[in-house]
Image (cartoon, rainbow, N blue to C red):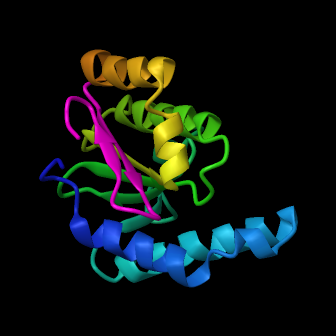
Amino acid sequence: MDKRINNTVIKKARYAYRSLWKNQEYSVGKATRSAINVVKKWQGDLVEKGFEAEFPNKNHSKELIGKCGRIDLVDLKKHVAYEMKVSGKNPGHEFYKDIFKVFCYNKKEGVKKLKVLVFMTEERGVKALEKEFPKEVIKLTKKTLGIEVALISIDSKYYYQTGKR
């Protein structure tokens, strides 16, 4: 795995997932609230360690926040963006949107460019994104945008990164 990816971030994500995710027991609305709780727990554990949650956030200018959307968690020292989709169902939409958020943020002048996007979801979601078209998008993201992409499972140790396994 890329040395810029913080192992504590991954461990905290897996812990929050195991502790709070209750998808099988709930309706869609309750599952959505459960997913929000997983992400908030994960972010809360890491903000104390110097990471920025919902980035850019209220500590940044309105111009920087702009229309790009917010990134779940950012490590500005290592230039890494972390995104989590708790459920592994239909990960594509969220995944492509997250690539765009990092690309859009990097286009702003005077910002520390994000060089790695870590997308975390259940193993079935990671495997769905390893198929031909998403795999090609990952390669193009690296080649044309200079953003390395890692797909990491939050319910197993499974991961995929361009050219690595």
Residue 21 image offset from top left, x and y in percent: 63, 74
In depth, the one of 66 and 50 nearer the eye is: 50
Horizontal placement of 78 versus 63: left or right?
Answer: left
Q: Is residue 10 above or below residue 164?
A: below
Q: Is residue 48 above or below residue 101?
A: below
Q: Is residue 65 magenta?
A: no
User: Which residue is found at the position 66% from the left and 68% from the top?
Assistant: 35
The quarter of the displayed image where residue 162 is located? top left
Horizontal placement of 148 versus 118: left or right?
Answer: left
Q: Is residue 132 above or below residue 89?
A: above
Q: Is residue 157 magenta?
A: yes
Residue 31 image offset from top left, x and y in percent: 76, 68
User: Which residue is found at the position 58% from the left and 60% from the top?
Assistant: 86
User: Which residue is found at the position 66% from the left and 40% from the top?
Assistant: 90
| Number of callouts | 0
Residues shaded magenta = 146-165
Residue 68 image offset from top left, x and y in percent: 55, 38
User: Which residue is found at the position 60% from the left and 81% from the top?
Assistant: 20
In depth, the one of 78 and 9 nearer the eye is: 9
The quarter of the displayed image where residue 153 is located? bottom left
* Residue 36 at least partly seen: yes
Horizontal placement of 77 versus 19: left or right?
Answer: left
Residue sitting at the far left? 3
Residue 109 image offset from top left, x and y in percent: 32, 32
* Residue 114 at least partly seen: no
